[in-house]
Image: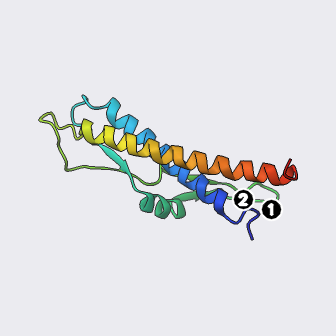
């Protein structure tokens, strides 16, 4: 049983997704003039699938050694390999990237407001409604 009912962890996962998507869009916009650059995108479904797999675990020779996992790649990010938007082989559509950035920003801000509201409610409960 989760202390907060899983809501905060779900919001955290959503914020991680939105942050990764924002980084990917920024990378696409930064490489709009790079020849043969292929645009990247983030899939939440693929992100969940990749997060379950592709981890490297440490070999422990003693039970007292710490156990840790290392992810081998950024989960959920994929590129459009066969798509050329420009004649130089670049696959970035600047209008689509800006629209996607605006949409992702709205999504991210909504999640931040929701998690902030959750923390304010918890703070109010801890203080006894004062």
Residue at 42% from the left image edge and 60% from the top image edge: 46
Which residue is nearer to you in this view: 116 or 21? 116
Q: Is residue 115 left or right of residue 126?
A: left
Residue most extreme to the left: 87
Which residue is nearer to you in this view: 41 or 69? 41
How crowded is the residue under tag 2: few (<14 C-alpha within 10 Å), some, or many (20+)?
few
Q: Is residue 116 left or right of residue 105?
A: right
Q: Position of residue 10 (x, y in %)?
A: 60, 59
Query: Any mark on residue 39, and which?
Result: none
Up-down: is 89 above or below 107?
above
Q: Position of residue 62 (x, y in %)?
A: 79, 60
Residue at 68% from the left image edge and 54% from the top image edge: 68
Mark 2, secondary structure of its residue: loop
Q: How many marks?
A: 2
Task: Find out whether the residues at labels 1 and 2 contact each other: C-beta distance under 8 Å.
Answer: yes
- Residue bearing the label numbered 1: 63
- Residue bearing the label numbered 2: 60
**Quadrant position of residue 1:** bottom right
């Amino acid at each position: 049983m989760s202390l907060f009912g899983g809501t905060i962890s779900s919001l955290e996962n959503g914020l991680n997704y939105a942050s990764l998507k924002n980084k990917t869009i920024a990378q696409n916009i930064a490489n709009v003039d790079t020849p043969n650059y292929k645009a990247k995108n983030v899939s939440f479904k693929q992100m969940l699938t990749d997060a379950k797999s592709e981890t490297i675990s440490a070999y422990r020779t003693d039970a007292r050694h710490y156990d840790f996992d290392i992810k081998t790649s950024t989960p959920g990010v994929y590129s459009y390999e066969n798509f050329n938007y420009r004649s130089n082989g670049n696959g970035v559509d600047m209008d689509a990237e800006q629209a996607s950035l605006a949409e992702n920003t709205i999504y991210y801000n909504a999640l931040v407001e929701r998690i902030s509201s959750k923390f304010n409610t918890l703070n109010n409960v801890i203080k006894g409604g004062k």
